[in-house]
Image: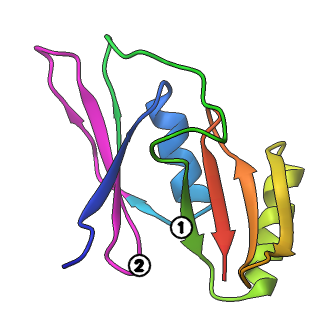
Amino acid sequence: MKIEHIAMYVNDLEAARDFFVKYIGGCSNNGYHNEKTGFRSYFISFDDGSRLEIMNRPDMEDMRKSAARTGYVHIAFSLGSAENVDALTDKLRKDGYEIISGPRTTGDGYYESCISAFEGNIIELTI
C-alpha cells in the first residue's frame, strides 16, 4: 500500500501551485474547475510518483494554524543531500520565506529545515 496523494485547501491556488513547482520541482496539471460549486484544484506530481492536490472553494474556513495542533502539521520533502537542503533553505530565505528551524540535525538524527511557506503552511526539507 502507498499514499496516492495528499490534499490541502489553500486560499491562493496559483501561489501554492507556483511554490511547489518552483521550489520543490513538482509538475502541475492544467487544473480542474467545477463551475457549479466553485471548487478548483490542481494536482502536483513529483518524480517519485507522489502527488499533492491543492484545492480551493468559495465557502472555506481559514482557521489559525498553530504549529502544535492536532491534525496534519507539515509536508516533508526529501532532497537527497544536506547540500540540497542547505541550498534550498538559503534560496527560500533570500526569497522572503520564514525559516522556522534549521538547517540542523535533529535529536532523532534527521537533517532538516522547516519553512513557513505560503499561508502559514509548514514545509520540511530533509535528506
Q: Pointer 2: what residue?
A: 47
- Residue nearest the observer in this picture, 7 or 38: 7
Amino acid of disc 2: Asp
Residue positioned 85% across, 65% down in the render: 102
The stretch drawn in magenta includes residue 44: yes
Magenta region includes residue 124: no
The amino acid pointed to by label 1 is: Gly
Q: Earlier in the sequence, mark 1 or mark 2?
A: 1
Magenta stretch bounds: 28-53
The picture places residue 42, in percent across and down from the top left corner, at 32, 44
Q: CA distance from mark 1 to mark 2?
A: 8 Å
Taking depth in this image into account, of 35 and 83 the one nearest to the observer is: 83
At a point 73% along the width and 58% down the height, the residue shown is: 114
Dot 2 falls on a residue whose secondary structure is loop
Quadrant (top left, top right, bottom left, bottom right) of the C terminus: bottom right
Corner quadrant of residue 55? top left
Residue 15 place in picture, x, y as percent: 55, 36
Horizontal relation, residue 59 to residue 73: left or right: left
Q: Which residue is mark 1?
A: 25
Q: Element at badge 1? A: loop
How packed mark 2 is, by other alpha carbons closer than 10 Å (few <14, some 14-19, many 20 or more), is few
Residue drawn at point x = 57 percent, y = 38 percent: 69
**Mark 1–mark 2 CB contact (< 8 Å):** yes
Q: Residues within 10 Å of mark 1 (few under 14, many from 20)?
A: some
